[in-house]
Amino acid sequence: MAEVVIHCIPEPGADPAAAAAEFEAYLRGADGVDPVLVEVEQPRLGLAEILAIVDIASGVVDLTEKLVAFINSRRDKAKVKDIEVEIDGQRVPVGKLTPDQRSRLAAAIADGAG
């Protein structure tokens, strides 16, 4: 299975523990994503950050669409500032993935699920 690291950055003032629980529940509800490890950490920038490590069980999971939908559904409630996907050690905002990065993420998922 492919392992993907997702960094969810809550808005300042949002409760990181509550945001982590909500993010974990959201990811657990996605077909093809299992298991999920979600924890709150303090990154070097000082703001609380939610780190999710997911194993992708299915190559058909469109993780980027699901993550963008999660951001959009929480932005108006001032809960989530952004989500970054870690690809080959490089963190990229999910909404700014280049076609090449999307291809590499999809290939990693397909290789891991195959």
Image: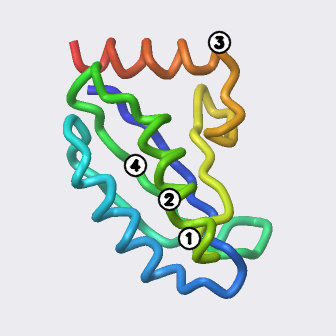
Please state which amino acid type lies under the numbered disc 4: Ile
Please state which amino acid type lies under the numbered disc 1: Glu
Are the residues tagged 4 and 3 within 8 Å (C-beta)?
no
The mark that comes first in sequence, 3 or 2, is: 2
Q: Alpha-carbon distance for marks 3 and 1?
A: 29 Å
Question: Which dot marks residue 51?
Answer: 2
Are the residues tagged 2 and 1 within 8 Å (C-beta)?
yes
Please state which amino acid type lies under the numbered disc 2: Leu
Quick one: which residue is furthest to the right in this view?
45
- Residue at (68, 42) in percent of width and height: 93
Query: Dot 4 lies on which element?
Result: strand
The mark that comes first in sequence, 2 or 1, is: 1
15 sits to left or right of 81: left
Are the residues tagged 3 and 1 within 8 Å (C-beta)?
no
- Residue at (61, 39) in percent of width and height: 94
The residue tagged 1 is: 41
Crowding at dot 3, Cα within 10 Å, few <14 / some 14-19 / many 20+, comes out as: few
The residue tagged 4 is: 53
Please state which amino acid type lies under the numbered disc 3: Asp
Query: Dot 1 lies on which element?
Result: strand
| Residue 24 at x, y percent in the picture | 33, 63
| Residue 60 at x, y percent in the picture | 28, 21
Question: Which dot marks residue 100?
Answer: 3
| Residue 111 at x, y percent in the picture | 33, 12
Q: Alpha-carbon distance for marks 3 and 2?
A: 24 Å
The mark that comes first in sequence, 1 or 4, is: 1
Crowding at dot 1, Cα within 10 Å, few <14 / some 14-19 / many 20+, comes out as: some
56 sits to left or right of 90: left
